[in-house]
Amino acid sequence: MMLMALLGPSATLAGAAPGVAPRKAVSRKAAAPPKAAAPQKKAPSRKAAEAPPAPTAASPEITAALRDNARGAMKRFYAARAFAPLWLRGDRIGPAADSFLDWVENADLDGLRPRAYDPADLREFVREARATGDPRTLARAELALSDRFARYVRDQRRPGDADMLYADPSLKPRRLKPEQILQAAALSGPFADYVADMAWMSPHYVRLRALLARAQKAGGDERALDQIRHNLDRARLLPGPWTLHIVVDASSARLWYYQGGRQIGTMKVVVGAFETQTPVMAGMLQWAILNPYWNVPTYLARNNIAPKILSGRSLASMHMEVLSDWTDAAQKVDPAAVNWSAVASGDTEIRLRELPGGANSMGRVKFLFPNDEGIYLHDTPNRDLFDKPDRHLSNGCIRLEDAPALGRWLLRRSITAGSKAPEQYVPLPVPVPVYLTYLTATETDAGVAFRDDIYRLDQ
């Protein structure tokens, strides 16, 4: 996978207008899961099992000052925690304040105006609170930090120019209330670490933000900087690591999964070619199918399978069968009754599926999330594909380097089927969001670079 456009004072990028939509992939229809076994809508949390950190105790004078001075959303948040402070450690402003001030003073990297959050005033509040230790001064700094933090996080998470198809509407970004932002921060591990790591944003966003800062410092030209900003807008749509989720980056052809504030695993994947792109999309994984069939795309039935049959191959030798239609009640059809010449010419559309087994293109398992594009994640017997530097080779679906590892995490057990029965639908204990994105900006020892823009989404 070639890296392009090393950033520096003389870096240039060829391109056209940004926001080019991916070409629609060919149909990849699949049988719908049985309705009777639908997963529960409300599932227990998959967060780390530890109890959330308890609020830090403060002196009665600080607690009283917070109670007297908090208003609106701040009062609702602090009242729910008995007016225990968030930014204080004992009776002093903790290190989270310094981390936050560093972030907000460089809010231009987020496409925001630093002055909208009054960083100079915040620094003065923090300095005075540390110098005097006065309860009312500490309370003023505490409330100002929480107010600016909630506004900054809200603005940072606001969608930019990037488009994403939401197969599950519940995953669409929504405007959070300040108390929701603060409560999430208070419950997500040690607060100082949460702020220092910018853990309300995706690790991919944090990485790209650092790349943009580095590129600006190196004097990268404006077109290159804009390309990184387009990447940032795509990463802005991804959740932080405290949200249970999977990310698939179609540019690097790699997958990551997160839980409880950390990355649990990563692996190579095979993604769609330029003609059959893996879309930028978010959906909810709900099913594992063990011993799956593979429904052959129409264009492969026409261009690949039908010519083989006409040249003398049998459908049985390819471990395939013909079905009457695409419904759940489809019946098997005798291959001898099919007009293969009409299939090869495109005059007749046919449904073919490959039978389960060691050579099946789906491997041992596929993971489904409802979407109109026919996209899913699946195992594969073609292991050599993962050694290729360019893995844009599929019809749009995502082939997994280590499906058993992902399956163990999703199902909390081995993905080994209990029998040889085909199409064993297993609901996931908890539906898991999956985000398909496209991030071309990367870092090398020599500086900031871009992978080939295979899908032409940066142009």
Image: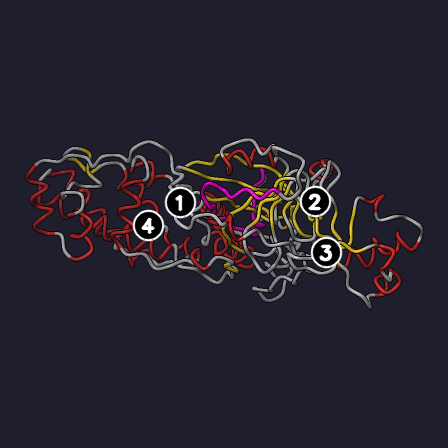
**Closer to the N terminus: mark 3 or mark 1?**
1
Lateral position of residue 276 relative to residue 153, left or right: right
As drawn, 120 above or below 424: below
Q: Secondary structure at mark 2?
A: loop
Lateral position of residue 377 relative to residue 162, left or right: right
**Which of the image's four quarters has the N terminus?**
top right
Q: Is residue 425 rendered magenta in the image?
A: yes
Q: Marks 3 and 2, Cα distance to the nearest angstrom?
A: 39 Å
The residue where tag 4 is placed is 104
Q: Marks 4 and 3, Cα distance to the nearest angstrom?
A: 62 Å
Lateral position of residue 96 relative to residue 249, left or right: left
Q: Tell which of 139 and 226 is nearer to you.
A: 139
The residue where tag 1 is placed is 43
Residue 390: mark: 2
**In the rendered view, how is the structure colored?**
secondary structure
Q: Tell which of 300 and 418 is nearer to you.
A: 418
Q: Which residues are magenta?
A: 424-445
Residue ID at (38%, 34%): 48
Disc 1 residue type? Ala
Q: Which is closer to the viewer, label 4 or label 1?
A: 1
Find residue 183 and report its horizontal and vertical position in percent. Answer: 27, 46
Q: Which is closer to the viewer, label 4 or label 2?
A: 2
